[in-house]
Amino acid sequence: MSSTALKAADFTGEQIEEGQKFIINNALFILFHESGHMLVSELGLPVLGREEDAVDGLSSVMLLESEDEELKAAMQDAADGWFLIDEAKGEGPQESDFIDTHGLDRQRAYSMVCMMSGADSDYFQTFIDSLDFPAERREECGGEYAKTRDSWFGLLEQHQDEARKTRFTVTYEPADNPDLQPFADLLQEAQVLEAIEATYGEGYNIPDGIKVTAKTCGTENAFWNEGTREITYCYEMAAYHAALMVNYFTNQNAPADASTEQVEAQSPEAEADANSVKLKLKD
Ligand SMILES: [Zn+2]
């Protein structure tokens, strides 16, 4: 139980880079998910079935159809994020509303993998082959993906206007917390909030003035607020994803003869305070 004594030196430069990319890519998926709620409420889109599943589908489609290959590739980390949450959570209480109100994490990860397979099975082949994803299921994914993409694009088409530009207000608030500030800096440097404006700021009849804000919230979460017309991403969510990676790397670095007890994942919450900021490379 001494892994709280982890030091930055325990991670290679490559791991730190991988961890930062993981945080950024998961933030992108979450922001595109919240943007789905924004579109449903701003454009009055009808939703069949659970809205949470529907906007996960939209988030996947927007990333997978993006001309920006980094957004497409982000799906791998986003799917891994749900697998790691599923493994880390075990039976314990869940602190995040964002996580709670959605489908079972593992199921959610697999439906993302199915979207990836359906969108471009060649591009994601190595990733998908590394998972326990049955061939029969893979065969259904092409059709499932096409259905999800076409129904969303069909809905959005009625609200598109090539000439239209929408103003978004993007804000990275100071974290007011020395443990969380490195995440604020990381997200700002990567311009994650700007990806929403880049995607929806042109060509859609969305009224001006939607706010996209990253801040310290006091909870690991992300929201769309219909009243204030604001998408919020909480720095605590980034810290949570960092903690998942710390666990993952710690298990990876553990000597092969370590007992299973030592290798077992620590609760990410317990790790978050002590170690998560250390994924930020020191200058
Ligand atoms: Zn949601």
Image (cartoon, grey):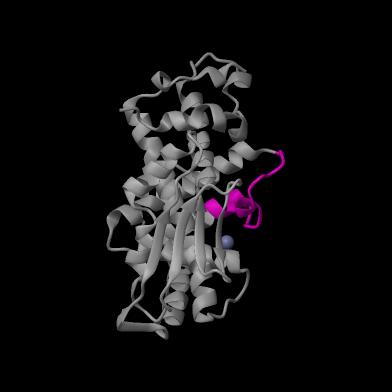
Looking at the picture, does residue 61 appear above or below residue 43?
Answer: above
Instruction: State the quadrant of the C terminus.
Output: top left
Locate residue 216, reporting x and y percent.
Answer: 53, 47
Q: Nearer the viewer, residue 117 or 182?
A: 182
Identity of the residue drawn at 41% across and 56% down? 171
Tell me the magenta residue range. 91-109
Q: How many marks?
A: 0
Identity of the residue drawn at 57% across and 22% down? 263
- Looking at the image, can residue 122 be seen? no
Instruction: State the quadrant of the N terminus.
Output: top right
Q: Nearer the viewer, residue 64 or 276?
A: 276
Q: Nearer the viewer, residue 204 or 143?
A: 204
Is residue 194 one of those drawn in magenta? no
Identity of the residue drawn at 46% across and 28% down? 249
- Looking at the image, can residue 218 be seen? yes
Task: Dividing the image into four quarters, tell me where ligand 1 lies.
Answer: bottom right
Q: For the view shown, which residue lies furthest in the top direction?
A: 257
Locate residue 206, reporting x and y percent.
Answer: 42, 78
Locate residue 192, reporting x and y percent.
Answer: 37, 53
Locate residue 70, reporting x and y percent.
Answer: 31, 52
Looking at the picture, does residue 235 appear above or below residue 265?
Answer: below
Identity of the residue drawn at 57% across and 42% down? 85
Looking at the picture, does residue 100 appear above or below residue 160?
Answer: above
Left or right: residue 12 compared with residue 272: left
